[in-house]
């Protein structure tokens, strides 16, 4: 199970930390869901999702502000001692002394942000979904080609990095070379990222390591990309039958998600960058409802039927 330190949330969203005496590295977030305590502020703690990040907005703050002092102290103590990992106040609200006292006593980090509650809630949930998504690491190159995330795979030394470099020179963007971290953010979406240590670098045999960002500029790199299709490079085999029509798609699977996969045989003289570009545009056309192979098949079938009728 993936986890994340609350410190990362504080740094990513520039939150104001009101409890610096609490070590936020020890506060571990395990779920991407967010909770806004509502009934809990009225004293009902049954079925409370206490493991989630807790957020308080205008409505919750107004409810607490209208409480009698004794009731508010009871709610603070009950909420902070329930096992919640942290509490974030939105719209610039700041905790009072009673809230901070209860939080520190129970090891709960309290932070605040100027952001609107709904916007911050949605953005934090989106970010946590990515950070806490199931993750695997594979060997390959991920490039954004015409808005399609193309994962290029194949044996070491077959030419993946060279193909990526040519694509970058043609105006496309590199996400990662050699090592691809794949996260499953939903049953339909896989996101690929680069490990921090190899970000923006490409290894070219005979030359060494090159910095894509430094050589080609920031427009040549991308931090993340959806994995929309996979291209597997393989040595040309005269004995093997390769798909020449592409009517039926082949798939490969990562973390239970299927992704369209094309096997491209490597042979001297083949321009891999152009082939990858063509495959990307063709894949986009298929998603928009147009299948060139099916169109050719329909034309041939109609032509045969027409000739049969004429005879």
Image: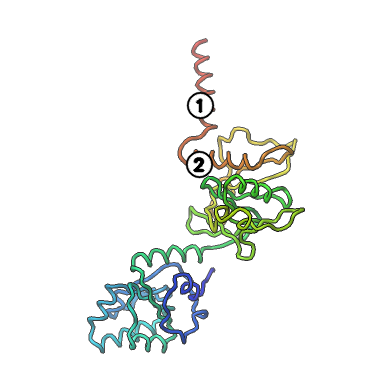
Horizontal side of 86 relative to 117 (left or right) equals: right
3D distance between C-alphas at marks 2 and 1: 20 Å
Display coloring: rainbow
Residue 287: give x, y in percent of width and height. Answer: 48, 41
Crowdedness of circle 2 by 10 Å Cα count: few (<14), some, many (20+)? some
Viewer-side residue, 293 vs 165 = 165
Q: Are marks 2 and 1 in contact (CB under 8 Å)?
A: no
Residue at left offset 43%, top offset 81%: 109
Mark sitting earlier along the chain (2/1): 2
- Where is residue 260 shown, x and y percent of the image? 56, 45
Taking 74 as reference, is 240 above or below it?
above
Name of the residue lying farthest toward the top: 311
In what quadrant of the picture does the N terminus appear? bottom right
Nearer to me, 250 or 160 = 160
- Relative placement, left or right, of 221 versus 112 is right
Q: Residues within 10 Å of mark 1 (few under 14, many from 20)?
A: few
| Numbered circles on residues, count | 2
Where disc 2 sits, the SS reads helix
Residue at horizontal 57%, vertical 46%?
Answer: 171
Residue that appears at 55% across and 42% down: 280
Residue that label 2 marks: 284
> Marks 2 and 1: which is nearer the front?
2
Q: Which disc number belongs to residue 42?
A: none
Where is residue 139 drawn, in percent x and y? 66, 56
- The quarter of the displayed image where residue 49 is located: bottom left
- Residue 292 position in % (x across, y down): 53, 32
- Badge number at residue 298: 1
- Give the vertical position of 233 relative to 306 (above or below): below
């Amino acid at each position: 199970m993936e986890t994340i330190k609350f410190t990362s949330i504080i740094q990513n969203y520039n939150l104001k930390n009101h409890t610096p005496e609490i070590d936020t590295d020890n506060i571990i977030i395990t779920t991407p869901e967010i909770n806004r305590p509502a009934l809990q502020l009225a004293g009902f703690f049954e079925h409370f999702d206490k493991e989630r990040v807790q957020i308080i907005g205008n409505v919750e703050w107004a409810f607490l502000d209208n409480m009698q002092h004794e009731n508010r102290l009871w709610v603070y103590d009950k909420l902070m001692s329930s096992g919640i990992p942290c509490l974030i106040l939105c719209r610039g609200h700041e905790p009072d002394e009673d809230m901070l006292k209860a939080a520190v006593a129970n090891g709960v980090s309290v932070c605040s942000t100027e952001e609107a509650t709904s916007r911050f809630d949605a953005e934090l949930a989106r970010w946590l979904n990515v950070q806490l998504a199931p993750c695997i690491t594979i060997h390959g190159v991920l490039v954004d080609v015409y808005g399609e995330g193309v994962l290029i795979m194949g044996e070491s030394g077959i030419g993946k990095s060279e193909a990526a470099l040519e694509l970058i020179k043609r105006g496309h963007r590199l996400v990662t070379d050699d090592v691809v971290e794949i996260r499953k953010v939903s049953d339909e979406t896989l996101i690929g990222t680069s490990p921090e240590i190899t970000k923006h670098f490409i290894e070219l045999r005979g030359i060494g390591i090159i910095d894509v960002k430094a050589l080609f500029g920031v427009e040549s790199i991308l931090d993340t990309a959806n994995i929309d299709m996979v291209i597997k490079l393989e040595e040309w085999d005269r004995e093997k039958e390769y798909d020449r029509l592409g009517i039926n798609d082949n798939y490969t699977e990562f973390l239970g998600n299927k992704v369209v996969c094309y096997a491209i045989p490597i042979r001297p003289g083949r321009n891999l960058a152009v082939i990858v570009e063509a495959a990307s545009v063709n894949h986009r056309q298929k998603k928009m409802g147009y299948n060139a192979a099916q169109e050719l098949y329909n034309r041939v079938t109609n032509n045969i039927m027409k000739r049969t009728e004429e005879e």
